[in-house]
Image (cartoon, helix red, strand yellow):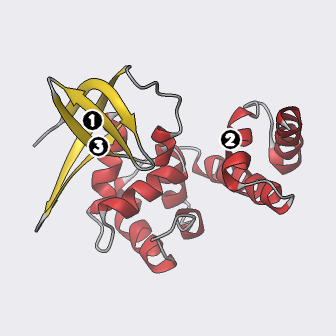
Amino acid sequence: MIHAISGELVNKGRDFLAVELHGITFKVLTHKRLLERPIVIGSKVSLFTYLHHKEDVLDLYGFDNQEELRFFELLISVSGVGPKSALGILSVGDIPQLEAAIKENRPDLLTKVSGVGRKTAERIIVELKSKVESSGSAIKVAGMESDSDVVEALMGLGYKADQAKEALKKVSKEAEGLEEKLREALKLLGRRG
């Protein structure tokens, strides 16, 4: 089992990072939140990994920290959830948000990714509810809903999903509620345009 990998980032794809270590380049599949970070080609990266093998498939999955790896392993322990679906779920939000969605019984927040339907999301909640801890889960879920509503509103105004998500990331943490976040995101998008 490969527990972690540290090396030079030599390529960055749509769903992977290529990490070179002593002349060997590893293709490490990962989630969008990690790929969206400004990681520079040529810089050193360290990832916790999970080696998935099935019949003729041997894939290496990478995560920023052990908490993400642990949550990924929990997700793939659920019947019907494969590694690619688990990565999709990790792209929806950070671990505290995802744990809050599970604790608050909110499958709708887990189905915002392709490949995860309502039945699968409900199965995740049933199987993992007792395995996750989340204090203040109602507040975290409200934040996820608000963020999702802001992205949908911006898309309704003609912005692309990636533009909307990028603007939302830059909205100050003090902004609360849909209107305040939307107003700030529109200001940020207006400066670029």
- Label 2, secondary structure: give it: helix
Residue indicated by mark 3: 28
- Residue at 50% across, 68% down: 114
Judge whether residue 138 can be spotted in this image: yes
In x, y percent, where is residue 140? 62, 47
Looking at the rendered structure, which numbered label has been put on residue 48?
A: 1
- Label 3, secondary structure: give it: strand
Question: In the figure, residue 46 lies in which quadrant?
Answer: top left
- Residue at 57% across, 50% down: 137
Vertical placement of 58 versus 35: above or below?
below
From the viewer's side, name the closer residue of 20 and 151.
20
Amino acid type, label 2: Glu
Question: In the figure, residue 10 lies in which quadrant?
Answer: top left
Do the residues under discs 2 and 1 have CB atoms within 8 angstroms?
no
Vertical placement of 116 versus 145: above or below?
below
From the viewer's side, name the closer residue of 74 and 189.
189
Q: Closer to the N terminus: mark 2 or mark 3? A: 3
In 3D space, how far apart are the residues under numbered discs 2 and 1 (Cα atoms)? 26 Å
> Quarter holding the C terminus?
top right
Q: Closer to the N terminus: mark 3 or mark 1? A: 3
- Label 1, secondary structure: give it: strand
Q: Residues within 10 Å of mark 3 (few under 14, many from 20)?
A: many
Q: Residues within 10 Å of mark 2 (few under 14, many from 20)?
A: some
From the viewer's side, name the closer residue of 162 and 90.
162
Residue indicated by mark 2: 166
- Residue at 49% across, 76% down: 117
In x, y percent, where is residue 48? 27, 35
Amino acid type, label 3: Val
